[in-house]
């Protein structure tokens, strides 16, 4: 059974992003880029399923600029068997990515696609759901546990009131939540091995997809700055301020 894992190259989660002076977006020049953390969890989960013997091949796919190859190599160092880059310099919005992924699914015929629940750059949380709709496949989002059965996948999801467990018929879409697993540390020998794995490159044209944006970003702005706090000498002064200045108690 084949699993497809879409991985996105995003600004590293440790980087404090800065809005461009013309407010058209976030400055990503000379900024450290990494694999979206939820996608690392997805690759780890697919790799664990393979190690358990439930899966025979894990294919990582990334849509974006040529440097996304690095993200695919990281996925292969974690455990993906090969990578596919859908290369484009175009701005990609979730619907375009979902269409590109659908075209890759049509070619690769995986039984399971495991995506991250959201990319930490735009926080869209849309691609998995859109892909499920385009393919007309069942979906289980925000997975905290994934178990493969015979022609089914059982997914536990964290919901407001506790845990919900769903059983889906394969082929299916799953998106990962933070507590699904803790991705392994990528070792140097595995980075070296990953360099020898196959990485194919396709274009949106070859997949018959027009990735042009459908939404226009009007403005990106920084959140308002916070005023500096003050130190109060004791609890009585704190209570007094909360009562008489902030008027919250
Ligand atoms: P989003 O809907 O943008 O929050 O992204 C949700 C998930 O879709 C991510 O965690 C990835 O698994 C996948 N995804 C989004 N954009 C891309 C991309 N450009 N290439 C590959 N996968 C992507």
Image: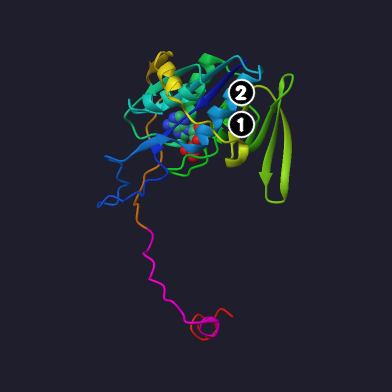
84 sits to left or right of 27: right
24 sits to left or right of 102: left
The percent position of residue 47, horizontal first and vertical second, equals 57, 23
The percent position of residue 168, horizontal first and vertical second, equals 71, 28
1 and 2 marks in contact (CB < 8 Å): yes
Q: Tell me if residue 234 comes above or below residue 53 in the rendering.
A: below
- The quarter holding residue 225 reads bottom left
The percent position of residue 186, horizontal first and vertical second, equals 47, 28
Colour scheme of this structure image? rainbow
Q: Tell me if residue 122 comes above or below residue 223 in the rendering.
A: above
For numbered disc 2, what is the local secondary structure? Answer: strand
Mark 2 or mark 1, which is nearer the start of the sequence?
A: 2
Q: Is mark 2 within 8 Å of ligand 1?
A: no
Measured Cα–Cα span from mark 1 to mark 2:
8 Å
Residue at left 59%, top 80%?
Answer: 249
Q: Name the chief secondary structure element in magenta.
A: loop
The percent position of residue 19, horizontal first and vertical second, equals 31, 51
Q: In the image shown, does 101 or 95 lie closer to the viewer?
A: 101
Based on the picture, tell me whether residue 238 belongs to the magenta stretch.
yes
Residue at left 38%, top 59%?
Answer: 223
Based on the picture, tell me whether residue 142 belongs to the magenta stretch.
no
- The quarter holding residue 176 reads top right
What's the magenta region? 223-239
Residue at left 49%, top 19%?
Answer: 104
Q: Tell me if residue 146 comes above or below residue 220 in the rendering.
A: above
Q: In the image shown, does 105 or 224 lie closer to the viewer?
A: 224
Residue at left 51%, top 84%?
Answer: 237
In the rendered image, which residue does mark 1 sit on? 174
Residue 6 visible here: yes
Residue at the left extreme of this rendering: 21
**Is disc 1 surrounded by few (<14), some (14 to 19) or many (20+) residues within 10 Å?**
many
């Amino acid at each position: 059974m084949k699993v497809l894992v879409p991985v996105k190259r995003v600004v590293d989660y440790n980087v404090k992003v800065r809005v461009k002076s013309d407010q058209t977006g976030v400055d990503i020049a000379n900024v450290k880029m990494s694999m979206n953390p939820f996608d690392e969890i997805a690759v780890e989960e697919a790799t664990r399923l393979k190690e358990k013997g439930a899966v025979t091949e894990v294919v990582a796919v990334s849509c974006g600029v040529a440097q996304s190859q690095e993200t695919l190599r990281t996925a292969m160092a974690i455990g993906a068997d090969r990578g596919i880059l859908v290369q484009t310099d175009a701005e990609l919005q979730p619907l375009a990515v979902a269409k590109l992924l659908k075209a890759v699914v049509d070619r690769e015929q995986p039984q399971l696609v495991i995506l991250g629940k959201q990319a930490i750059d735009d926080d869209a949380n849309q691609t998995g759901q859109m892909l499920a709709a385009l393919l007309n496949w069942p979906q289980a989002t925000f997975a905290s546990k994934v178990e493969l059965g015979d022609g089914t996948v059982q997914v536990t999801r964290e919901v407001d009131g506790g845990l919900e467990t769903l059983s889906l018929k394969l082929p299916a879409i799953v998106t990962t939540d933070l507590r699904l697993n803790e991705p392994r540390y990528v070792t140097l020998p595995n980075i070296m091995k990953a360099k020898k794995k196959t990485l194919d490159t396709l274009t949106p044209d070859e997949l018959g997809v027009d990735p042009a944006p459908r939404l226009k970003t009007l403005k990106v702005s920084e959140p308002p700055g916070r005023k500096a706090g003050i130190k109060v000498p004791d609890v009585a002064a704190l209570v007094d301020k909360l009562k008489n200045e902030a008027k919250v108690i």
